[in-house]
Image: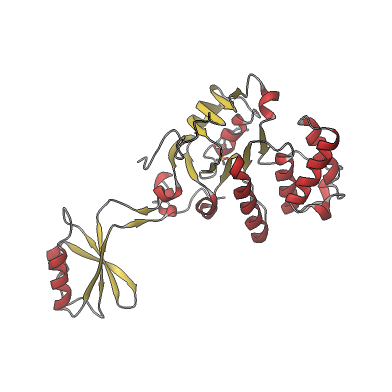
Amino acid sequence: MVTNVTMPSAAGDQSGEAPLVKATDLHRSYGATVAVDGVSFELRRGEILGFLGPNGAGKSTTLKILTGTIAADSGSALISGINIEESPLEARKRFGYLPESLPFYWEMSVGDYLRFIGKARGLGGDHLRRRVDEVIDLLGLGRMRWRTTGALSKGFRQRVGLAQALIHDPEILILDEPTNGLDPQQIIEVRALIQNLANTRAIIFSTHILQEIAEICTRIMVIHSGKLVADAKPGELSGETSDGWEVVISGADISGTDWRRLSLEKAGSIRGGEHLLTYRGSGTPDITAIEAAARETSATLLEVRRPRKTLESAYLELTGMAAKGRGGGR
Ligand code: ADP
């Protein structure tokens, strides 16, 4: 059932540069629950990797292992070549992390909080002051600078979360549901920000929003029950399939023809006067015979094409949810 899987990196390695993130055979269980089951991948500069999967699939656990928040039972995670378990402090300088829920110091103002995180990341003096100003500006937090983090709306808290992830200008960003809790305008802004940041960085972010993936990611990884079931470019998951044929006929009423003799089955009307038929025969449909059959009923053959798969149907297939519908969403 694994389709379009291109390992280890859909983007390939044209630069010759070592991967900024390298996960090798990560495993992690919570008691009897296997949360991450043999996850391996590499991430390179310029990539925006959308990490997709239903609730409970293992996204957060994978990101927590990569960031050293929890340890893997086995396997290794390298951040800019540094083993996160062996040298967590060194590795942390290289990435920014927006966790699922950020530990805030509720009494601190936004400015103080960002200064505090900056210091913890090794910044100081003028550099720290400049970076605090820059991330406040970048995330549109100017008006909130003196407000305590405990008094912020969910959307502004999420922006502060992004600001703290960026404070030390890391080359890797690991973001757990970065648009969670944002309003539509803020979501658009954060997506644009992620795209801008990706030029010189590697970004991995988890989401359960398919539209987000299609819009900004250069690569998609789908996880299901702790296992990677796809690693591909967005266009490779959706788009044309190589499975069977569809025929589109234009005509007011096409019931006057026995389409079954051409191995065609009516699959429904597309829009006014256009009908979709599915080819059930072997090999390719006989276009000349179909054209002749269409003429019998004053209709026209418009198109013989491969069926198209949407990103959503590909996702449902990969996560085994097609039969159950949209289960597992948050
Ligand atoms: P996702 O981020 O894709 O929603 P998670 O990584 O949070 O998935 O969870 C993967 C699996 O591990 C789920 O079955 C979840 O219930 C379980 N799990 C996650 N964290 C814990 C924990 N702290 N204790 C016990 N089980 C957990």
Viewer-proximal residue, 171 or 315?
A: 171
Res. 304 in view? yes
Q: Looking at the image, which is closer to me, 46 or 292?
A: 46
Is residue 264 rendered to the left or right of residue 103? left
Residue 120 percent location from the top left of the image:
78, 31
Residue shown at 41% from the left, 44% from the top: 318
In this image, 309 relative to 165: left or right?
left
Q: Residue furthest top?
A: 86
Taking the spot 16% from the left edge, 53% from the top edge, the residue there is 283
Q: Residue 7's spot in the image, x, y percent? A: 42, 34
The image quadrant that residue 176 belongs to is top right
Q: Position of residue 196 (x, y in %)?
A: 62, 49
* Among the 4 quarters of the image, the one containing residue 171: top right
Q: Name above or below for residue 76 compared with residue 294.
A: above
Q: Can you see residue 105? A: no
Rendered-image quarter of ligand 1: top right
From the top left corner, tell me how far across and down residue 130 is, in percent: 81, 42
